[in-house]
Amino acid sequence: ETGVTQTPRHLVMGMTNKKSLKCEQHLGHNAMYWYKQSAKKPLELMFVYNFKEQTENNSVPSRFSPECPNSSHLFLHLHTLQPEDSALYLCASSPALRTSTDTQYFGPGTRLTVL
Amino acid sequence: GQQVMQIPQYQHVQEGEDFTTYCNSSTTLSNIQWYKQRPGGHPVFLIQLVKSGEVKKQKRLTFQFGEAKKNSSLHITATQTTDVGTYFCAGPPSNTGKLIFGQGTTLQVKP
C-alpha cells in the first residue's frame, strides 16, 4: 500500500458514456500526475498538477479532462472515448514538482476498457 | 525532446542466472530512478542515483549511474522467481522535476 488510492479499479464503458476516475493520496504530497500505460508502450505522462495548478498537458485529447480540487485529490473525467483509449490509467504523487526530482508514488491504477 | 531508451525489451532467464537491463538517455540526467512493476501491479520505486559513477546495492540488485550521467544499469545476481516483473528507469529533463520513463524491460524467470 503506497498511500495512493484509485477508484474504480476496473471500468468498462461505451464510447458515448461519461465517467470519472478518482485518485486520492494520503501522503501530504503537493504534486499529482496522470499516466497512461498501454500494452507494449512506455508510461505516457498525461497531466501534472503542482499545488493544484496544472503545469503539464502532454498533448492529451480533450476527451480527457483532469480536475484537481485540492492537493489530495485528482480526477480524470472521460467522455466519448475511443477503443484505443483502453489502457491502465495510473495516478502518482510526489512531494512537489521542483528541479530536483522527488520519488513518485503510484496508485494501483484503473484498468479501462472502451467498447 | 528527451528520450530514455531501455534494452532489452524482454528477457527470459533460468532461475539462478544473472540479469542486466540498460538504460540510455539522449540528454544528461540530474538523477535516475528505477521502478519495478509486478505483473498486474503498479510501478514501485526501487532506488534513485544522483552522482556520476554512483553504484548502489540492494541485496542481489546492483544499480549503476554512468560517469556522463546519461546511462544506467540494473544488474540482478542469481535471479529468483520473485524478480519477475518489468523494470523501468526514469529520469527528469533538466530543471522540470517531471520524469520521463523508459519503455521498461520485462523479466521472466523460469524455475
Image: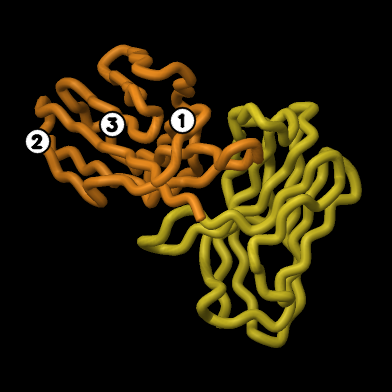
Query: Is A101 above or below relative to A74?
Result: above
Give the letter of the chain under mark 2.
Answer: B
Left/right placement of residue B83 relative to residue B4 reads left
Q: Earlier in the sequence, mark 3 or mark 1?
A: 1
Checking the image for residue B14, the label placed there is 2
Work out how far the residue at label 3 is from the one at label 1, CA to CA, in angstroms: 20 Å
Name the tint of chain A in the rendering.
Answer: yellow
Secondary structure under the numbered disc 2 in the rendered image: strand
Q: Amino acid at mark 3?
A: Asp
Q: Which residue is mark 1?
A: B32
First in residue order: circle 1 vs circle 2 = 2
Quadrant for the C terminus of chain A, please. bottom right
Q: Tell me which residue sits at (24%, 26%) in the image.
A: B75
Residue B83: image tag = 3
Q: Residues within 10 Å of mark 1 (few under 14, many from 20)?
A: many
Residue depicted at 38% across the width and 51% down the height: B103
Q: Quadrant of the N terminus of chain A?
A: top right
Disc with the residue nearer the chain's start (2 vs 3) = 2
